[in-house]
Amino acid sequence: MTAQPAELRVGIIGTGNIGTAHAMSLTREVSGARVTCVFDADQARATAVAYQVGACVCSSVSALIECPDVDAVLIASPDDLHAEQALACLAAGRPTLLEKPLAPVLSDAEAVMAAEVALGRRLITLGFMRRFDPAYQQMKAQLDAGVVGEALIVRNLHRNTAAPYGLRSVGTLTNSAIHEMDINRWLLGQDYASVQVILPKPGPQTPPGEFDPLLVFFTTTSGAVVEIEAFANAWFGYEVACQVVGSRGQLDLGDGSLLIRTDERRRGVDLPELWLGRFGDAYRRELQAWVDCVRGLDDGQGAATVWDGLAATTAAQAAARALQSGSPEAIQMPKRPALYQ
Ligand code: ISE
């Protein structure tokens, strides 16, 4: 019998909402890994998480990346720190799970891709966890099998209870709707050709000069239309939905609720407040797949790469231009490096 590879020692950068959730999941649910180090600019927050998972607290990002008790790094820091931290992990040769987005700014995303291409091996996995959601996986399997014919229209709803990091329209695109920008590329197996943004009447909680909700319309290279309603301050709860209209049928992704409750002349479901309530299982599956891949037990197929991260940021930046211009914007993907073929 071949020996099991050693347990993966993971260092986590960022102990906010998702970083803490990953630390607990790696400690209590995922096999083959343990958290050995954590870092957060808020040292008290890092110390609290470290205590709960039996890890040490590093004094800096570089100390964590270089720590001899760390084999792989999970980056769950604020979006605008992702690129610099990913570059540091590449320089140290650390396998990395990088929470989305790769970077809000295209030039930063391109710099990470250039560094990974120069290294000649894929060390970074992007945390587009919906690819591990059982419902989205079933949807992709049926699309790939041609069950509903050719996809013509995809309608997406992405509603947050409250803007997670304060409402900025561009942030809604680069931080939130970027999930749809990735998952629709993955579902359809196509890139985007153009994008247009329509601005409904802003809701009452929308700061002056910002827009919420947003309606984003992509066309794909095959001519399909991908519509995204991105509503950061939806107030009534967290909801993600996806409907694919095909040439011979339709697929509707459920809202993830497990029960429909009927009581006195009312019937309904409970909506989660945050994304962990809807995608907890997807996050766990994503973490297990990443740990297995780094340990050599899985080929990592299906997980998002830096190329996917660049494609999503390219789409988000084009949508930001369309938001500003009020006109359709063309989208041109760069040549795909051999590392990502
Ligand atoms: C957050 O960062 C996530 O990734 C959630 O999945 C998304 O729904 C939310 O809008 C983002 O802010």
Image: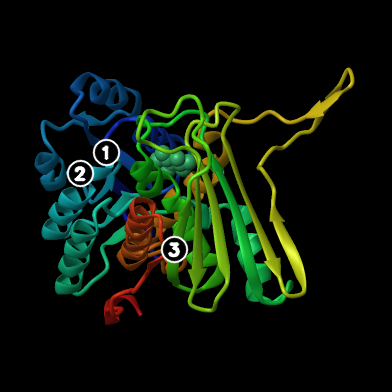
Residue at disc 2, secondary structure: helix
Judge from the rendering whether residue 34 lies leftward or rightward of residue 110; answer left or right.
right
Quarter of the figure with the C terminus: bottom left
Q: Which residue is mark 2?
A: 81
Q: Residues within 10 Å of mark 2 (few under 14, many from 20)?
A: some
Q: Nearer the viewer, residue 177 or 37?
A: 177
Mark 3 lies on a secondary structure that is: strand
- State the separation of the CA atoms marked 2 and 1: 6 Å
> Ligand 1 is found in which quarter of the picture?
top left
Indicate the position of residue 289 as horizontal and vertical percent values: 44, 56
Badge 1, how many Cα within 10 Å: few under 14, some, many 20+? some
Mark 3: give few (<14), some (14-19) or many (20+) Cα within 10 Å: many
In primary-sequence order, the first of circles 2 and 3 is 2
> Where is residue 40 shown, x and y percent of the image?
21, 30
Residue lying at the far right in this picture: please name it. Answer: 265
Q: Quadrant of the N terminus?
A: bottom left
The residue positioned 53% from the left and 52% from the top of the image is 228
Disc 1 marks a residue whose amino acid type is Pro
**What amino acid is at disc 2?**
Leu
Callout 3 amino acid: Val
Some atom of ligand 1 lies within 8 Å of the CB belonging to the residue at label 2: no
| Label 1 CB-ligand 1 distance < 8 A | no
Question: Helix, strand, or loop for circle 1?
Answer: loop
Respond yes or no on whether mark 3 lies under 8 Å from ligand 1: no
Say which residue label 1 marks: 78
> Tag 1 or tag 3, which sits nearer the N-term?
1
The residue pinned by badge 3 equals: 195
Do residues under tags 2 and 1 come within 8 Å of each other at their CB atoms? yes
Between marks 3 and 1, how big is the CA–CA gap? 26 Å
Q: Are marks 3 and 1 in contact (CB under 8 Å)?
A: no
